[in-house]
Image: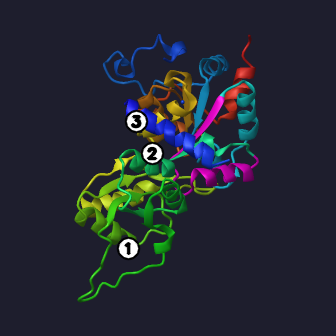
Amino acid sequence: MLARSTALLSFLRSRARSTPISCSFLSSFPPRAAMTTANGTKPPSSSQPLSPQAARSLIDSVDAFLFDCDGVIWKGDKLIDGVPSALQALRSLGKKLVFVTNNSTKSRKQYAKKFTSLGLDVSEEEVFSSSFAAAMFLKLRNFPREKKVYVIGEEGILEELRLAGFSCLGGPEDKDKKVELKTNFWFGHDKDVGAVIVGLDQYINYYKLQYATLCIRQNPGCLFIATNRDAVGHMTDLQEWPGAGCMVAAVCGSTQKEPTVVGKPSTFLMDFLIERFKIETSRMCMVGDRLDTDILFGQNAGCKTLLVLSGVTALADLEHPSNDTHPDYYAHSISDVVELSRTCAI
């Protein structure tokens, strides 16, 4: 564990030089598994709507807010109402703001540029993406430098891999490649590929699926890594689109293998957050719009959790009897945290 922490710290310091993370107010609640109705069944939801008192208590009890991006900060390239003022207010209160996204289409540097283009002052060091997590997973495993990485995904993964010193192929470069399903056609692949990373890829095609499948099935010891398994996401402001989970499922089907998932809800990224910000997870609040990734990530790590209904999850989804993931609180959007806290009597 010490060696891992040392490696993390060393890497983060090198990146900083190379480019200019106990819910006390809920302690009286029994564990979720113990919360049952009189007839022994689980209640529809153990979550509470965010009230003025709860908002004030939440802000006072945490040092860092971890925000998902798609459906929380923006939808596509459009900011969600109230986001700029909410973030500014939290910063003015001395809170650390961290942005933890499963969307692997951009690198941390590219995400920083997107924040800037939308008028938000967010640095690269405050962004932790699944593209970054995939590269760091290989780095911490001492992935051999002579081996290559094949990518089903977009430029964000490739950029993070190159920054970490790895050779990679695939990605957008293979978007127009085709196969010929005819007699005597042989599909070749690079036998030096030692890992396949699958993320969100709007240009996925049969060529990429076959290439990834052959590498995983035929190259000895080839790693199968997924940035995340999100089913859908707000890639545009008006509707949801298929997420990385669709691409991952296709490769799972063809290889009959399960991947190592490095994005939420895996707590792999949390190691970086703790090392970078020196904050206990009990003093963090994970804010997201997905129950199965954002909220579960926060719960797995021991953070407080707040679901916002500005993205893929509706109140009906949260309260549905089949749902077994319940955040501590839910609200319409992140602006509610600040606005409600201001209405709380001191």
Relative height, residue 8 to residue 155 (above, below): above
The C terminus lies in which quarter of the figure? top right
Q: Foreground: 240 or 205?
A: 205
| Residue occupying the point 27% across, 86% down | 185
Read off the residue under disc 2. Answer: 263
Q: Which labelled disc corresponds to residue 206?
A: 1
Which tag, 1 or 2, sits closer to the chain's start? 1
Is residue 23 visible in the rendered image? The answer is yes
Question: Callout 1, which amino acid?
Answer: Tyr
Relative height, residue 164 to residue 150 (above, below): above
Element class at badge 3: helix
Q: Answer left or right for 231 relative to 36.
A: right
Which tag, 3 or 2, sits closer to the chain's start? 3
Is residue 324 visible in the rendered image? The answer is no
Mark 1 or 2: in front is 2
The N terminus lies in which quarter of the figure? top left
Q: Position of residue 286 (x, y in %)?
A: 54, 32
Question: Callout 2, which amino acid?
Answer: Gly
CA gap, disc 3 to disc 1?
Answer: 38 Å
| Residue occupying the point 39% across, 52% down | 226
Relative height, residue 313 to residue 34 (above, below): below
State the extent of the magenta-drawn residues as a range: 96-119
Mark 3 or 2: in front is 3
Read off the residue under disc 3. Answer: 4
Q: Foreground: 198 or 192?
A: 192
Colour convention of the picture: rainbow
Q: Foreground: 191 or 131?
A: 191
Which tag, 3 or 1, sits closer to the chain's start? 3
Question: Callout 3, which amino acid?
Answer: Arg
